[in-house]
Image: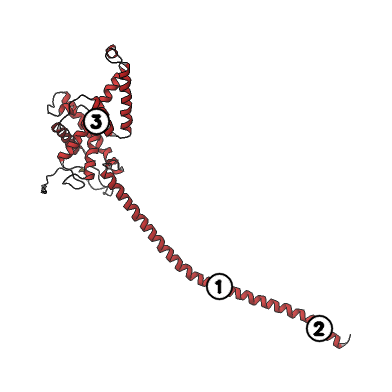
Amino acid sequence: MHKEERNELVEEQAAPGDGIRGLFQGMKKEKQKKVVGYNRWQNEGKGVGQCRYQELRRRQVKIETETWEEAAKEYRELLMDMCEHKLAPNLPYMKSLFLGWFEPLRDAIVKEQEMYGEGKNRTAYAPYFVQLPADKMAVIAMHKLMGLLMTGTEHATVGTARVVQAACGIGDAIENEVRIHKFLEKTKKKKGDRSKKNKASESVADIKEEQKLRKKVIDLMKKQKLVAVRGLVKGKDDTKPWGAVIKTKVGSRLIELLMQTAYIQPPPDQLLDAAPDIRPAFVHSFRTVAKVSA
């Protein structure tokens, strides 16, 4: 082979090697550009992400704060609404207090009723004080008094109540419950006792009508529709009204017994080695109220 031909062959063989090397170098440069761009994007992203994180965190804290404030406002409105509708005794804290007050108050009422049965209690209100079971009287007294204290009365702020107004309210509730109790007991006896005298004096239709009315009264009581219950019972009750004086005396005596038996439990944060701080739940005080002239 001639020298010129060998040189051409060498040049032809070298050409592909230079092309591949150049291709590799180009790929390497392109890869370096991508790496540099990625690093730059990552560094910029870190800065933006940090700012974004702080912004989102502040936003989350703000949303949580507004949520808690809205929840607290909702609970306050719910509490006020329950107090306005005299449903404060249904609150969990009130129920926990009633659990501690109920038994001592009921026992005190039972003792009062037993004294009347033995002839030791000759007060004017005593005959009316024994017309209802002691447990019902205790529940009515606690609920009515706490309902008045949580809503406030005329010339009194929330947490206080005028004794006369509270006594009248409790006495009125006791009288209404006595009417309902007597009606249920009366219809219950007629249902269980079918003597010849009852059969002769009353027809089967009258008995069925009374049983139907009894069932309706019980259903309304379960639904707590007391106004409708009073309307139904009033037409079937022939007892004389108690009068304001008797109702006030019955209510006053129940308030007095509640004040003697109801106490507030020690606070949870009280030290274990300290003496128990048991306080009366209710305190009676005198206050001068100025009448506003019209």
At label 3, the amino acid type is Glu
Question: For the residue carrying disc 1, how many other residues have a C-alpha within 10 Å: few (<14), some (14-19), or many (20+)?
Answer: few
How far across and how far down the image is residue 131, in percent? 21, 26
Q: Is residue 203 above or below residue 86?
A: above
Furthest residue in direction bottom, as rendered? 3
Q: Quadrant of the N terminus?
A: bottom right
Q: Residue at x 39, y 60 (%)?
A: 61
The Cα–Cα distance between marks 2 and 3, rounded to whole angstroms, is 123 Å
How far across and how far down the image is residue 162, in percent? 16, 42
The Cα–Cα distance between marks 1 and 2, rounded to whole angstroms, is 44 Å
How far across and how far down the image is residue 194, in percent? 31, 15
Which numbered disc flags the more N-terminal residue, 1 or 3? 1
Label 2, on which residue? 10
Q: Secondary structure at mark 1?
A: helix
Question: For the residue carrying disc 3, how many other residues have a C-alpha within 10 Å: few (<14), some (14-19), or many (20+)?
Answer: many
The Cα–Cα distance between marks 1 and 3, rounded to whole angstroms, is 84 Å
Q: Secondary structure at mark 2?
A: helix
Label 3, on which residue? 177
Indicate which disc residue 39 carries.
1
